[in-house]
Amino acid sequence: MAVLLLLGSCDELAVEQDVLSTLKKIAAYEHNAVDQQKKLNELEQKQNKLYDQIMSYGMKQFTKVEQLSKESLELIKERDKHIEKEHKAIQSAKREINAIKKKINQLHDGNIRRQATRLVDIEKKRYETYDDLYLHYKEMLSLEKDLYILLQNRHTTPEQLQRHIEHVNEQYKKLIGANQQFNEDTETYNKEMKRLYHMWE
């Protein structure tokens, strides 16, 4: 009987270690995504400065506006590279979270199993929110690209410009909304993750 209990205990420990190892993998992918977010923020700040400069010049100083618009298009290319790297990291984390469900069902402690299941459900919802955020960001980049192409056309009318800027602003509102939801989901996930680790201590 003592041998069976020991084997059972070792088996339970192995499952817990397996789940913990997968959660650490997810954290590593998430860390990579955060690195990309930091780079995106830096590029966005540079782009905002260029945009403010362009707006201060106006189309009367077309040569300056044209040059700054070209620089802005280069920044958009860089942002696109980083959002794709971020997306790849999140997709890798998502694959891990989908694979962890079966491992969680093997956990012997009912309270830990329920908390781990809750954590996975929260993370899946969070990744759904990220998918929306990603699509909104890609659409935003597309609209910004079109804007800077317009600004390089000397024949662009103020009405055309204003209309396109309104489209950009509408998309920006959608992006902000998705980002706020993602941040809330992230905060919830981090709280539930801490709760799970405390249960394992």
Image: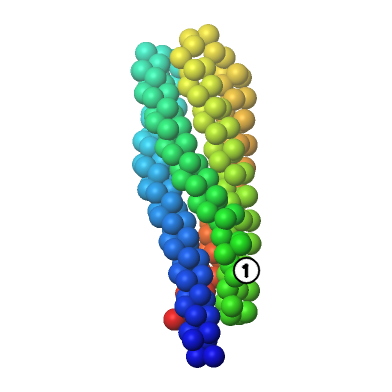
Residue located 61% across and 19% down the image: 159
The residue depicted at 61 percent of the width and 62 percent of the height is: 102
Percent coordinates x, y for residue 20 in the rendering: 46, 67
Q: How many marks?
A: 1
Q: Position of residue 200 (x, y in %)?
A: 48, 78
Q: Which residue is mark 1?
A: 105
User: Camera-side residue: 132 or 19?
Assistant: 19
Give whichever of 57, 9 is nearer the camera.
9
Q: Quadrant of the N terminus?
A: bottom right
Circle 1 residues within 10 Å: few <14, some 14–19, many ≥20: some
Where residue 163 sits: x, y (%)?
62, 25
Q: Is residue 142 above or below residue 46?
A: above
Instruction: Answer with left or right where residue 57 lies relative to residue 110.
Output: left
For residue 100, above or below residue 142: below
Residue 154 visible in the shown view: yes
Q: Amino acid at mark 1?
A: Asn
Residue 143 drawn above or below residue 184 = above
- Residue at image position (58%, 51%) is 127
Residue 190 visible in rendering: no
What quarter of the picture does the C terminus occupy? bottom left
Scheme by which the image is coloured: rainbow
Horizontal arrangement in the rendering, residue 101 relative to residue 30 (left or right): right
Residue found at the far top of this picture: 155
The image quarter containing residue 172 is top right
Q: Position of residue 21 (x, y in %)?
A: 44, 63
Asked which secondary structure carries label 1, the reply is: helix
Q: Give the left or right position of residue 5, taking residue 37 as reference.
A: right
Residue at horizontal 57%, vertical 55%?
99
